[in-house]
Image (spheres, rainbow, N blue to C red):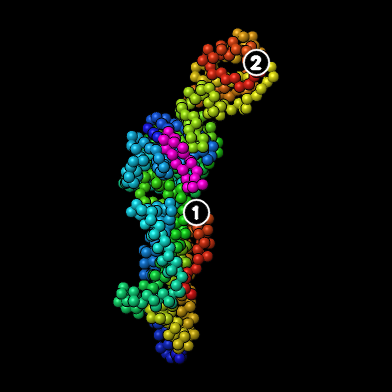
């Protein structure tokens, strides 16, 4: 649905030239909620702004819904943008217009006539749960309500794609959750493809199907969440289940076991202790629902060095679990 | 010397003041109309032709944008720095070309507009720069055209600030309209000079001052009222106040 091909972008020139995006390629399948994570300064904002060409890339192509935006002229680009909604961190609502007026702006731009605008804006405000606030001004709303207006405005012209530029970063945790739920509902009910950027792993965990990790303008990891978490050494998986830095325990082997999908509810540890007669100690554990599946990671300490525990580890791997040895006695 | 005990004095005074007030309002009204019609687009273009602005590349060329920006900026600075009395006299040939004469209230509208346009254009520029750039960006993302962004986003959002700017502009137009009267324009300025100064009539002088003061207060009051009203509905009270403070720093050129 969204296809970004070797997009590069830099700002400034000469010695002060900074590369924001370095040959970034991404594919967002239709109907997906795709999250791009990264620290501030990684180039996330630049990336999402190149998708609707608010920022024109120096090189590379952007294709959305089958149209190559980077090849379009000004007028065609405007029309194409009408099919791509965008939600902003700071909401960007017109203070001179009511909630309804803000939503109608999107329809005025497209050229919808007045009566239809009223009907459509009422409908979409109901969808985001703000039907009762239609005649309020943005200054009278809370942050979460403002973002709902922002979402309503982005959806008014029935786009196929929604871009979310840190939509929840200015909101408190509870409001964040309700906005994410709304995005999920929209994605499911309207079949909308969502590309979002965030610096919060929680956002990815809560709603994303796929994710990419952006670092210094490059994509470091990229894939479906279910697959990423069972990928050995995945940075994103480590961030999804924060167990802290690996520790070494004298006389023991420390391993991380990742459960996902079908094996999440099996009594793996009890079995391990029984079958191999090991005194397993649990150092840490994190269980999450990721992309609708139960998944978790447990850190265990097994007495003895790696060699002693080789059989047990092989057995665990044979059960389809991802086992990483993070610390232990060097044999 | 006017004889204030003559039986016709008071009715003459009323006639003279009514005519003067009417002429002043006529000059100020039309000068204001032209100021808005011309000053508003210039102010918008001043912001728009800056780097990264909406009209940064007119006809697809950044160079044209840069030149336009420099020229507008120069003209606005020139217009604001030439003292009004000199401007008024210097443009007499132009006034004659436009109106056919350089004497009378109608002719006075030309120099009054010319002095107020650059001033108001700066006010518009300041107000538009106060608008959050994120709003233009949001409109872009919706697929709005430049013209739609100007009409539906920039102007409505900058309205409270522009109204305050307009209030200041009106005051300076009234101020200069009195000076026009001294030369040839008519209006209350003319009354003050021909009766108050040349014929030593203190009553005329005091009456003119009071009338001008009342006109300024009323117009200022109206403009401020609407500016506050729009700023309140939009919750941008603080923004309007900031703009007001900035405006207070910029006084019109001339005297």
Q: Residue at x 57, y 22 (%)?
A: A297
Instruction: Quadrant for residue A125, please give it.
Output: top left
Can residue A128 be seen in this snapshot?
A: no
The residue singled out by tag 1 in the image is B236
* Residue A245 appears in view: yes
Q: Name the residue under label 2.
A: A331
Q: What stretch is highlighted in magenta?
A: A6-25
* Residue most extreme to the front: A14
- Badges 1 and 2, same chain: no
Q: Position of residue B149 (x, y in %)?
A: 38, 51
Q: Residues within 10 Å of mark 1 (few under 14, many from 20)?
A: some
Residue B95 placement, left or right of A258: left
Which is the main secondary structure of the residues drawn in magenta? strand
Q: Quick check: marks 1 and 2 in contact, CB under 8 Å? A: no
Query: In the picture shown, does residue B59 fall above or below A57?
Result: below
- Report the mark closest to the observer, 1 or 2: 2
SS of the residue under disc 2: loop
Asked if residue A75 is positioned above or below residue B15 in the image, the reply reads above
Task: Name the residue: 44% across, 60% down.
Answer: B124
Q: Quadrant of residue B64?
A: bottom left
């Amino acid at each position: 649905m969204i296809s970004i091909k070797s997009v590069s972008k830099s700002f400034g020139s000469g010695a002060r030239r900074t590369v924001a995006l370095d040959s970034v390629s991404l594919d967002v399948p239709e109907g997906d909620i795709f999250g791009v994570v990264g620290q501030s300064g990684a180039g996330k904002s630049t990336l999402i702004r190149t998708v609707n060409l608010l920022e024109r890339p120096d090189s590379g192509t952007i294709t959305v819904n089958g149209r190559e935006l980077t090849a379009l002229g000004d007028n065609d680009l405007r029309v194409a943008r009408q099919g791509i909604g965008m939600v902003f961190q700071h909401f960007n609502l017109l203070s001179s217009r009511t909630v309804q007026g803000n939503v109608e702006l999107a329809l005025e731009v497209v050229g919808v006539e007045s009566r239809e605008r009223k009907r459509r804006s009422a409908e979409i405000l109901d969808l985001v749960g703000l039907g009762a606030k239609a005649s309020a001004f943005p200054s009278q709303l809370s942050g979460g309500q403002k973002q709902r207006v922002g979402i309503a405005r982005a959806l008014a012209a029935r786009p196929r794609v929604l871009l979310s530029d840190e939509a929840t970063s200015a909101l408190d945790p509870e409001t964040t959750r309700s906005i994410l739920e709304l995005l999920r509902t929209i994605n499911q009910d309207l079949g909308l493809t969502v590309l979002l950027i965030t610096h919060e792993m929680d956002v990815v965990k809560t709603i994303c199907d796929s994710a990419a990790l952006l670092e210094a303008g490059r994509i470091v990891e990229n894939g479906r969440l279910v697959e990423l978490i069972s990928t050995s050494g995945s940075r994103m998986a480590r961030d999804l289940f924060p167990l802290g830095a690996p520790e070494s325990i004298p006389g023991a082997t420390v391993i991380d076991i990742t459960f996902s999908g079908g094996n999440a509810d099996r009594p793996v540890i009890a079995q391990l202790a029984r079958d191999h007669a090991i005194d397993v100690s649990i150092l840490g554990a994190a269980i999450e629902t990721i992309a609708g599946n139960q998944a978790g990671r447990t850190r265990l300490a097994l007495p003895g060095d790696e060699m002693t525990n080789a059989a047990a580890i092989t057995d665990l791997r044979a059960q389809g679990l991802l086992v990483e040895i993070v610390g232990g006695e060097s044999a | 010397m006017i004889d204030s005990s003559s039986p016709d004095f008071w009715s003459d005074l009323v006639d003279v003041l009514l005519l003067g007030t009417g002429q002043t309002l006529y000059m100020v009204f039309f000068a204001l109309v032209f100021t808005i019609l011309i000053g508003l687009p210039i102010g918008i273009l001043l912001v728009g032709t800056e780097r990264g602005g909406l009209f940064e590349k007119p006809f697809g060329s950044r160079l044209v944008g840069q030149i336009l920006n420099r020229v507008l900026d120069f003209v606005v600075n020139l217009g604001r720095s030439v003292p009004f009395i000199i401007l008024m006299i210097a443009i007499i040939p132009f006034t004659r070309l436009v109106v056919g004469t350089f004497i009378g209230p109608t002719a006075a509208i030309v120099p009054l507009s010319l002095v107020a346009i650059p001033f108001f254009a700066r006010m518009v520029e300041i107000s538009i720069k106060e608008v959050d750039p994120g709003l233009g960006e949001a409109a872009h993302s919706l697929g709005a055209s430049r013209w739609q962004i100007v009409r539906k986003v920039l102007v409505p959002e900058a309205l409270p600030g522009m109204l305050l700017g307009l209030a200041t502009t009106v005051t300076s137009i009234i101020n200069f309209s009195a000076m026009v009267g001294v030369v040839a324009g008519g209006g209350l300025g003319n009354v003050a000079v021909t009766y108050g100064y040349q014929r030593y009539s203190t009553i005329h002088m005091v009456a003119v001052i009071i009338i001008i003061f009342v006109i300024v207060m009323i117009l200022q009051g109206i403009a401020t009222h609407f500016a506050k009203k729009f700023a309140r509905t939009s919750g941008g009270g603080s923004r309007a106040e900031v703009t007001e403070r900035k405006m207070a720093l910029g006084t019109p050129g001339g005297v």
